[in-house]
Amino acid sequence: MATKQSQEAASAEAARKLEEYIEKIHYSDRYSDDEYEYRHVILPKPLFKMIPKQLFNPDKSGTLRLLTEQEWRGIGITQSIGWEHYEVHAPEPHVLLFRRAKNFVAPQQPAQQQVVNGKGKARRK
């Protein structure tokens, strides 16, 4: 039992640290050129060390591969829709570079369809 309790305590401590590190992620101000707006995201080094190995380049360079939105959100990065991880910077692998089209407009959520039931009352489908 003590082993299970110590594993649970270690797991809880790791989760607490992860949350603490996520709160310390730094998001730069946006900057732009004619085509894109950019920002960089700086991960705390302890958080960078916790990233699953499958997200790193297989070449053993110690850099992340380009991450999908689901992957970068999965490691705690939060930013509005439309951003893409477009480049890695080997000298500072904990700095992720993002961009999105300068004229990006988030897609509209489809309106929920109204359906009329047999009694003449509308209900959401």
Image (cartoon, helix red, strand yellow):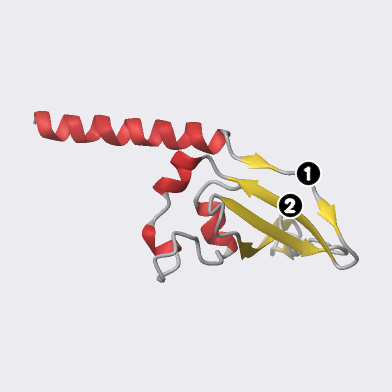
Is 12 on the left or on the right of 24, as rendered?
A: left
* Residue 124, numbered circle: none
Answer with the quarter of the image where residue 116 lies.
bottom right
Question: Measured from the top left, where is residue 42 in percent x and y?
Answer: 61, 45
Quadrant containing the N terminus is top left
Q: Which residue is pictured at 86% across the width and 68% down the height?
A: 35
Say which amino acid is labelled 1.
Asp
- Residue 40's place in the image compared with 66, above or below, is above
Q: Which residue is pictured at 73% across the width and 52% down the height?
A: 39
Residue at image mark 2:
39
Asked if one can make out residue 82 in the rendered structure from this viewpoint, the answer is no
Is 34 on the left or on the right of 59, as rendered?
A: right
Q: Which residue is pictured at 48% across the width and 41% down the height?
A: 45
Q: Secondary structure at mark 2?
A: strand
Q: Are marks 1 and 2 in contact (CB under 8 Å)?
A: yes
Answer with the quarter of the image where residue 81 lies.
bottom right
Q: Which residue is pictured at 35% across the width and 35% down the height?
A: 14
Q: Nearer the viewer, residue 109 or 20?
A: 20
Is 26 on the left or on the right of 35, as rendered?
A: left
Question: Measured from the top left, where is residue 28 in percent x and y?
Answer: 73, 44
Question: Measured from the top left, where is residue 29 in percent x and y?
Answer: 78, 44
Say which amino acid is labelled 2.
Arg
User: Farthest residue toward the front?
Assistant: 91
Q: CA distance from mark 1 to mark 2?
A: 6 Å
Q: Nearer the viewer, residue 122 or 19?
A: 19
* Residue 29, numbered circle: 1
Q: Nearer the viewer, residue 79 or 55?
A: 55
Q: Nearer the viewer, residue 93 or 84?
A: 93
Count of picture labels: 2
